[in-house]
Amino acid sequence: MPQSNDSNPVVQPAQADSLELKADTTDTLPHRTHFYERGLVGKAYRYLRDANKMPPDQGKDFGIIPGPHYSSTTGLGLGILGTLTYSTHRLDPTTPRSNASVFTDMTTGGFFLIGMRGAHYTKRGKTRTDYKINVSTFKTKYWGIGFEENKQDANETEYTRNRLYGLVRFMWQPARHLYVGPMVQYRWFQAKKRDTEMLHLWHGQAAIVHALTAGISVTYDSRDFMLNATRGCFFQLDQTASPKALATEGFGFGTTETTFSTYKKVWKGGVLAWELHGLFNYGYVPWCMMAETGTTDRLRGYYEGHYRDQSLIETQLELRQHLRGRNGLAAWIAFGHPFRRFDEMRWQHILPNGGVGYRWEFKNRINIRLDAGITRDGDCGIVFNINEAF
């Protein structure tokens, strides 16, 4: 009688029939689906679940997501954020990935915004084009110019601000990580429905102001990924002029703006990021183009434009911690000081800021962030945005 091999046992016909029957029975069992896997809800669920799983050989990665938010500046709102990363030469690993973001926002406070921004690299990063454009209208508040006027609650007055903003930088790379080139910027503002009893806070300045600005930009950027860096540093210096011939009558000024940030891994999943930013105006600067506190990226939580003056220095230190899967947390402390002249700077005029935030990885290394920031007066502002603050 022939011997069977234990490592390759012989299956008898009766056993084969039994196995085939079991397989058929298993295949005919109904698939159990959850409510969040059906219809439009299911499509949205699967889209968000797989949004950060880009195939490694895919040249483009686009995603779009809506997000509710609230802030003390704009009220309750709904924003729609879209992001695209792409490579102009995907077979060349030395070419940095370009990026573009489109965004729109509407809130109960009468705020409406639409715009886009991004950075485009050519092969091997030899040239880089940064761009930003947005249009907005907003029923907002104004406290005047300078710390003494800004801190007075009695100076609070409402008006409707319409704004058009555009910026383009075109830079060459003379050395590794270094970019140099011209830049141009256009700003147009309109203040409607100003309170006639509070016009003194505008110091006789016009309600409609515009300026065409030109200058040179120098950038050093060694970050591993500009939208969510974990190592490297960034330095940018913009020196611009807004001549009287290209601005609203009576206004003519120059601006120096500098930004330095650095990033370092401190432990598993932890990144410590630090930024120092300065904006210095000189000449006759219109009220709407002065340095302001309270953006979505710096001094988060302050009402936008509550404090404004000729110049501003601000810094922030943020710890970013990856938790599990696509989730993360961030905590920061920050300080800012608006001032007219250096000899007028005072310790008591420093604006402290701190807060915590939640991070969710929407696309590969692109985070949706929800930040809650506390101000000097104890107010809390909520910021919903895409990409890290800096």
Image (cartoon, rainbow, N blue to C red):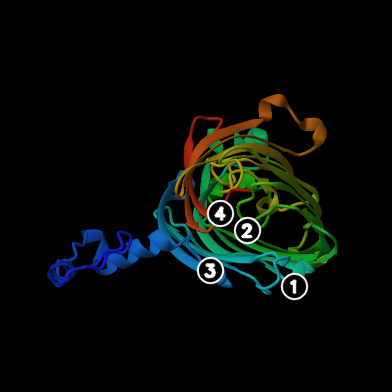
Q: Let me know if residue 178 appears in the view.
A: yes
Which residue in the rendered view is the most extreme toward the front?
1
The residue labelled by disc 3 is 61
> Residues under labels 2 and 3: Cα distance?
43 Å
Dot 3: few (<14), some (14–19), or many (≥20) neighbours within 10 Å? some
Q: Is disc 2 placed on a helix, strand or loop? A: loop
Kind of residue at badge 2? Ala
The residue labelled by disc 1 is 123
Q: Earlier in the sequence, mark 3 or mark 1?
A: 3
Q: Earlier in the sequence, mark 4 or mark 1?
A: 1
Q: Let me know if residue 373 appears in the view.
A: no
Q: Is disc 1 placed on a helix, strand or loop? A: helix
Dot 1: few (<14), some (14–19), or many (≥20) neighbours within 10 Å? some
The x and y percentages for residue 172 are 82, 67
Q: From the viewer's perspective, is the residue at label 3 or at label 4 nearer?
A: 3
Kind of residue at badge 3? Asp
> Residues under labels 4 and 1: Cα distance?
24 Å
Q: Nearer the viewer, residue 333 or 128?
A: 128
The x and y percentages for residue 275 are 69, 42
Q: Earlier in the sequence, mark 2 or mark 3?
A: 3
Q: Quadrant of the N terminus?
A: bottom left
> Residues under labels 3 and 1: Cα distance?
18 Å
Kind of residue at badge 1? Lys
The residue labelled by disc 2 is 207
The residue labelled by disc 4 is 387
Question: From what the image shows, is residue 31 above or below residue 284?
Answer: below
Tell me the tag on residue 134: none
Q: Is residue 251 left or right of residue 306?
A: right
